[in-house]
Image (tube, grey):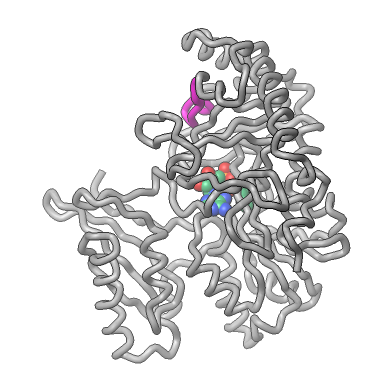
Amino acid sequence: MTGPRDLLDGAERMSREELEALQLRRMRATLRHAYENVDFYRRAFDAAAVAPEDCASLADIARFPCTVKADLRENYPFGMFAVPESDIRRIHASSGTTGLPTVVGYTERDLETWAEVVARSLRAAGARPGHKVHVAYGYGLFTGGLGAHYGAERLGCTVIPASGGMTARQVRIIQDFRPEIIMVTPSYMLTLLDEFERQGVDPRSTSLKVGVFGAEPWTEEMRREIEERFAIDAVDIYGLSEIIGPGVAQECAATKDGLHVWEDHFYPEIVDPITGEALPEGAHGELVLTSLTKEAMPVIRYRTRDLTRLLPGTAAAPFRRMEKVTGRSDDMIILRGVNLFPAQVEEIVLRTPGIAPHFQLRLTREGRMDHLTVRAEARPGATPEQRTEAIGLISSGVKDGIGVSVAVEIVDPETLERSVGKFKRIVDARPS
Ligand code: DLL
């Protein structure tokens, strides 16, 4: 298996000082590029009375205003582009649950950069030239499929562009084409698991060695479940379309101890999710990212809403790491004053005997009170006693671990909705 020394392109051999000098040069150039070519940034910097020249050190980035998703929406579709439309080679968009999609554009060089960071990510995950990579992230406006695709080709792998859906066929292809690597959302991997079992194929018997999972939060318990059931290494890939797509940060298969942020292209900060104040190194908070090399759509201090913290680099690579993202500030449920993230419930459900790794959180309102029901699915063959016991284990797990009372319902095997991509854990049935 790969070690962190096997990162791809020599960037890991930079010293921290060299990396920071490179970041500062790129940060200043990006600020200037944004200020000179995007009306939105010119107005925002002027309003905050800062100019690109005010960035004399990396810490000075905190003097610049943040960008939020609504800013991208307000400039729909192409208002955030910093180059003429004729220089844009590709457009992606993320649908979002409300309103207009967020549009992102790439120049030819941006596409090169993207392929490079995904290739580097795959290499850190343990992929090697000549491996076959089954890409089951959706192709299309979503960045998952095409982002993974070109990165895997860049590394010298053979790509199987399966995209999402047609689950029975995916299982067939995995058996027949014998990929070593799969790239897919962790929740869809569980849907594939069911299908392997339905077809009577042992999921541990496939050619797969590594799964590169991202696009949604997943826990250490989910990692154990997937590794155990498929006999593979499960590693985390992080990214977001606003910044580039998959390949902003990646976990090494050998260490699985946080995701190296590819800091030569993306500058991370952590801020207080409520006040937006920059927080000291190591503190938990919201990840904010600044692109350092993007041409088509430079992004300054983008508020990701993703909650994590930064850890130092390792002996093998100067890039700081981010802890696994297990929640987004906008996925947080506030239930009778207590904050609860779906990932906390995932940990509890996945360690409950007799319960499958499938659950949903259903929010309802009775009178003026919000109620949460955890609907979890029994494993095939779970006994009635196990099902009864699971109700107690999950409700006391949530009460003791998170501090709030919830209802628990155990449903029959294969009754909850299955993921085909990014999975929606929360069903909000409250009257609007
Ligand atoms: O999900 C890009 C991507 C594709 C990443 C494939 C990894 C693999 P968006 O659709 O813009 O882009 O959604 C970005 O997804 O802000 C996080 O909330 C969440 N997310 C992405 N990766 C992870 C991860 C893609 N590894 C949003 N862990 C981000 C937790 C993740 N959440």
Q: Residue at x 43, y 73 (%)?
A: 350
The vertical placement of 318 against 237, above or below, is: above
Task: Indicate the position of residue 104 as horizontal and vertical percent values.
Answer: 64, 32
Of 29 and 70, nearer the camera is 29
Q: Is residue 154 above or below residue 304?
A: below
Q: Is residue 254 visible?
A: yes
Residue 115 visible in the displayed image: no
Q: Is residue 69 magenta?
A: yes
Q: Can you give x and y, in whole percent of width and height, for residue 429 in the image? A: 29, 54
Left or right: residue 60 compared with residue 23: left
Report which quarter residue 123 is drawn in: bottom right
Q: Estimate the x, y position of residue 318 in percent, counting from the top left.
A: 69, 44
Q: Is residue 328 left or right of residue 179?
A: left
The residue sitting at 25% across, 71% down in the picture is: 395
Image vertical order of residue 75 relative to residue 303, above or below: above
Q: Which residues are magenta?
A: 65-73
| Residue closer to the observer: 83 or 322 | 322
Q: Tell me the quarter of the image containing the C terminus.
A: top left
**Residue 405: image location, x then y, percent:** 20, 63
91 is higher (above) or lower (below) than 194: above
Is 88 one of the magenta-colored residues?
Answer: no
Q: Nearer the viewer, residue 98 or 249?
A: 249
| Residue under the point 29% across and 64% down | 401
Q: Say which of 388 and 313 sits in front.
A: 313
Q: Quadrant of residue 198?
A: bottom right
State the image quarter where residue 257 is shown: bottom right
User: Image quadrant for the N terminus?
Assistant: bottom right
Task: Count the labels in the image.
Answer: 0
Q: Is residue 357 left or right of residue 157?
A: left
